[in-house]
């Protein structure tokens, strides 16, 4: 079950209010199938079209109906099948930016003020073509206008996030039963897909760190990187980043598994990340400063004498895996409806770290764990 037309109308009404406030006549929303930071999800937020290939432009006027321009017919068909933009166009032999320029020249004037989402990801050549070929009073960066609306999820969006979290938990539970000596990293990846896809997951972004525990951990232990055909053997530990996506909405859970008895250094490090998680949760709730979660984690790491890596300890999760990275210099407060991934990590030594995580929903009275899997260090 996808998002409803009621959800569409809510988003479009809020977006047009913001456009009115900013004096924008039109929004040009660029999209592609990549992962290029927290503005990538803006197209999906406005159109409910989850790009699976190529590049697109949505023309969203403050008054009138939006039009989505795509490069090939299968994108047009998918937009009509699952998206919200009934006027989705694909013109043979006409590149997407030219299609958009032609339409914009029909609906704009030299007094039009056009916002673009976003200069952070749109190709320079496309941006230049829009400016050169469309007569407008002003072009302004407007990616943040859409992005800010995304940070607080509606009830329908939260259900997607809950669904993704259930899949993340299910993958972890399955892998604890599946992993044994001789299983390769690629085997583990295949099992993730085997769980996710039949349960409504549209994709997953999963990496892992597999290495020996001997001698304090074989470098680069703990760094999640693309999988290989390396088999797991007794004395190894694997760090699993599990990130399923449902209807565009991501979840992230990170866990550690040892084949055999865990080395003392890993037991100790794992306990520290859980202690840092617990400390951060004391600062998770409506109206609390975002930065409090990061500061609490850093205090725990420093208390134990570990070198801190402050970037990536906490982030908001939604239509982008990282909708917003909370850092030691972040401002703003947490709000009900925000989905927050706690990511305690710290350096264990050269090319070695421990990395861990799970996801929560900020509620009116506190928070709700979306991932409910055990947080124990698994030893097989």
Image (spheres, helix red, strand yellow):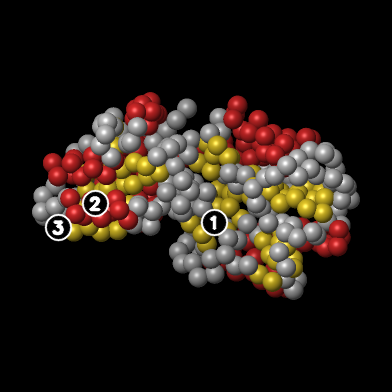
* Residue 129, disc: 2
Figure check: 39 above or below 304: above
- C-alpha span from label 2 to label 1: 35 Å
- C-alpha span from label 1 to label 3: 37 Å
- C-alpha span from label 3 to label 2: 16 Å
Tag 1's secondary structure?
Answer: strand
Would residue 297 be seen by someone viewing this image from the given angle?
Answer: yes
Give residue 166's position: percent from left, percent from top: 62, 37
Please give left or right for residue 167 compared with residue 17 in the image.
right
Marker count (numbered): 3
Mark 1 neighbour class, 10 Å CA radius: few under 14, some 14 to 19, many 20 or more = many
Q: Earlier in the sequence, mark 1 or mark 3?
A: 3
Nearer the observer, disc 2 or disc 1?
2
Q: Which residue is drawn at 72% across and 36% down?
A: 187
Mark 2 neighbour class, 10 Å CA radius: few under 14, some 14 to 19, many 20 or more = few
* Residue 315, disc: 1
Q: Do the residues labelled 3 and 2 touch (CB within 8 Å)?
A: no
Q: Residue at x 10, y 54 (%)?
A: 110
Would residue 142 be seen by someone viewing this image from the given angle?
Answer: no
Residue at the extreme front of the image, as rendered: 93
């Amino acid at each position: 079950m996808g998002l409803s037309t009621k959800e569409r109308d809510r988003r479009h009404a809020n977006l047009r209010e913001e456009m009115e406030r900013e004096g924008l006549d039109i929004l040009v929303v660029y999209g592609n199938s990549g992962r290029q930071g927290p503005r990538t999800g803006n197209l999906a937020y406005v159109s409910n079209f989850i790009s699976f290939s190529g590049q697109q432009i949505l023309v969203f006027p403050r008054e009138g109906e939006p039009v989505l321009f795509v490069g090939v017919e299968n994108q047009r068909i998918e937009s009509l099948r699952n998206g919200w933009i009934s006027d989705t166009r694909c013109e043979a032999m006409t590149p997407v930016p030219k299609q958009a320029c032609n339409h914009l020249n029909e609906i704009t004037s030299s007094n039009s003020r056009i916002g673009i989402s976003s200069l952070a990801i749109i190709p320079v050549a496309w941006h230049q073509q829009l400016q050169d070929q469309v007569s407008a009073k002003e072009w302004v960066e407007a990616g943040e206008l859409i992005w800010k609306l995304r940070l607080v999820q509606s009830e329908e969006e939260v259900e997607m996030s809950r669904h993704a979290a259930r899949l993340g938990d299910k993958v972890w539970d399955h892998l604890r039963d599946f992993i044994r000596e001789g299983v390769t990293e690629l085997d583990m990846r295949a099992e993730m897909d085997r769980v996710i896809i039949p349960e409504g997951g549209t994709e997953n972004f999963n990496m892992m760190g597999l290495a020996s525990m001997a001698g304090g951990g074989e470098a680069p232990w703990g760094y999640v990187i693309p999988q290989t055909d390396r088999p797991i053997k007794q004395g190894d530990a694997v760090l699993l980043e599990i990130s399923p996506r449902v209807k565009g909405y991501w979840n992230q859970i990170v866990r550690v598994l040892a084949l055999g008895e865990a080395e003392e250094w890993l037991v100790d490090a794992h306990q520290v990340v859980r202690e840092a998680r617990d400390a951060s949760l004391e600062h998770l709730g409506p109206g609390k400063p975002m930065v409090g979660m990061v500061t609490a984690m850093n205090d725990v790491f420093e208390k134990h004498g570990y070198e801190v890596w402050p970037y990536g300890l906490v982030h908001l999760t939604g239509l982008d895996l990282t909708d917003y990275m909370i850092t030691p210099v972040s401002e703003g407060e947490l709000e009900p409806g925000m989905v927050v991934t706690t990511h305690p990590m710290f350096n264990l030594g050269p090319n070695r770290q421990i990395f861990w995580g799970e996801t929560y929903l900020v509620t009116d009275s506190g928070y709700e764990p979306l991932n409910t899997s055990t947080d124990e260090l698994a030893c097989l």
